[in-house]
């Protein structure tokens, strides 16, 4: 069988060797981390070590890290009207979410539908901060959720500026940093985030592990999401996934140790890919290219391209890419992100995402461009449409 080329790191990343080692060590631990005996203490010690590593990744305190069963669950925990601070014990009266958030944020957590409002984005996929300020005027104690980097376009949001606006309006800011960690510096205190969501499998940990991290210590949830044994300071009951958490910590440590080098490596491959796409098919549109983006993500389209056809053609050529909007049914859904950016429907229907990671090579990019070279000639014959935008 020919070697596969994996360019879908935003969907999930391969396990890092350091995470595999940590997993293998921890999976042999017998104890329940809540038990007081030596076996239990060994498991607890492993979890607390990983907590330290996750805190270090964000410049947070160890006590601020709450492990969850996924990034999705961390988002569901964060989006609660019953978040209190030292100064504010009343329930949050409004949830403001950007129009490009992941489905797990768009679901709104425990807020009633009628208390949720969308914040639009501009044509480049950046949250409209003037619209945010306007929407905050009608709230007393809002919670705002804005992602640090978008999973489809990779566009990075002005989180520090948003935090200033939100705090001036007596609000709290939740930041979904699932796609950003390991790809850019994520100092949550410097950016003013009050709560941050992470997911292990996007940085080379295991699937089914996440974390919600507090950016300030006086944040308190009056209601846990999962009740029971009181684990994770009462916020997430259930015996901890010790081996998964250990792997998460090791992946975080490895990602932060090599952050600058890895980011430079990703950027050079991404740029090579994008230059190649355009050299082969000059009408290629790369979404969000004019603004700050993650170094690893390309969301592109072309007049006449159909997402399903392209993803299958790449797959048959041995290359894994995706439609930006992955969905559990495996079907391609029209992207709510591109719709929010005002991209024309024909271009949206051809959107393909390629995302690279630490083990991607130049040869991988060349293989992907060879597949594009075979796909592209049919496009120029097939369509007279012009690109609607090139943000
Ligand atoms: N948030 C963003 C931006 C994501 O891209 C994802 C996963 O695709 C999630 C949250 C959900 O994370 P998990 O897969 O751990 O539930």
Image: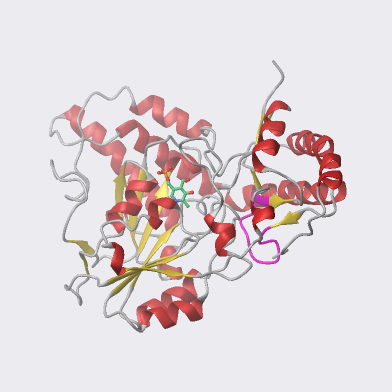
* Residue 113 position (above or below residue 355): below
Image spot of residue 356 (x, y percent): 64, 43
> Which range of residues does the magenta coloring cover?
287-299
Question: Residue at 68% across / 53% down in the picture?
Answer: 346
In the picture provided, is 78 more to the left or to the right than 86?
right
Foreground residue among 4 and 94:
94
Q: Say whether residue 241 is magenta.
A: no
Where residue 123 sits: x, y (%)? 63, 68
Q: Is residue 124 left or right of residue 206?
A: right
* Picture quadrant where residue 192 is located: bottom left
- Res 360 visible: no
Q: Quadrant of residue 88?
A: bottom left
Which color scheme does this rendered protein use? secondary structure
Residue located 47% across and 36% down the image: 329
Q: Position of residue 361 (x, y in %)?
A: 72, 37
Q: Is residue 289 magenta?
A: yes
Secondary structure mostly seen in the magenta stretch: loop
Quarter occupied by the N terminus: top right
Q: Residue furthest top?
A: 1
Give the image location of residue 243, x and y in percent: 34, 31
Q: Is residue 383 above or below residue 206?
A: below
- Number of labels in the image equals 0
Q: Quadrant of the C terminus?
A: bottom right
102 to the left or right of 284: left
């Amino acid at each position: 069988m020919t070697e596969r080329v994996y360019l879908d790191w935003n969907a999930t990343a391969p396990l890092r060797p350091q995470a595999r080692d940590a997993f293998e060590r921890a999976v042999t631990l017998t104890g329940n981390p809540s038990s007081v005996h030596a076996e239990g203490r060994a498991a607890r010690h492993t979890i607390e070590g990983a907590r330290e590593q996750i805190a270090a990744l964000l410049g947070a305190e160890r006590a601020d890290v709450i492990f969850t069963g996924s990034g999705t669950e961390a988002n569901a925990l964060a989006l609660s009207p019953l978040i209190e601070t030292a100064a504010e014990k009343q329930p949050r009266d409004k949830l403001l979410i950007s129009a490009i958030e992941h489905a797990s944020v768009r679901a709104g957590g425990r807020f009633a539908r009628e208390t949720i409002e969308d914040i639009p984005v501009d044509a480049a996929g950046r949250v409209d901060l003037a619209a945010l300020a306007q929407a905050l005027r009608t709230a007393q104690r809002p919670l705002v959720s804005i992602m640090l980097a978008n999973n489809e376009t990779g566009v990075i949001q002005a989180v520090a500026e948003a935090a200033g606006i939100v705090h001036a309006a007596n609000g709290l800011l939740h930041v979904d940093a699932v796609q950003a960690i390991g790809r850019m510096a994520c100092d949550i205190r410097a950016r003013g985030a009050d709560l941050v969501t992470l997911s292990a499998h996007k940085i080379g940990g295991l699937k089914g592990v996440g974390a919600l991290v507090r950016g300030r210590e006086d944040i308190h949830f009056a209601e846990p999401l999962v009740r029971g044994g009181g684990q994770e300071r009462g916020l997430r009951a259930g015996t901890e996934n010790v081996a998964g958490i250990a792997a998460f910590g090791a992946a975080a440590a490895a990602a932060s140790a090599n952050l600058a080098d890895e980011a430079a490596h990703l950027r050079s491959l991404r740029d090579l890919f994008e230059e190649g796409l355009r050299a082969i098919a000059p009408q290629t549109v790369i979404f969000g290219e004019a603004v700050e983006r993650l170094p690893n993500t390309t969301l592109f389209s072309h007049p006449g391209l159909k997402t399903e056809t392209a993803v299958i053609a790449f797959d048959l050529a041995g290359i894994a890419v995706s439609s930006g909007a992955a969905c559990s049914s495996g079907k391609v859904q029209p992207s709510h992100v591109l719709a929010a950016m005002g991209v024309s429907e024909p271009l949206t229907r051809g959107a393909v995402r390629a995302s690279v990671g630490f083990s991607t090579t130049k040869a991988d990019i060349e293989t992907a461009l060879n597949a594009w070279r075979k796909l592209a000639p049919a496009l120029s014959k097939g369509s007279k449409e012009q690109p609607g935008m090139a943000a």
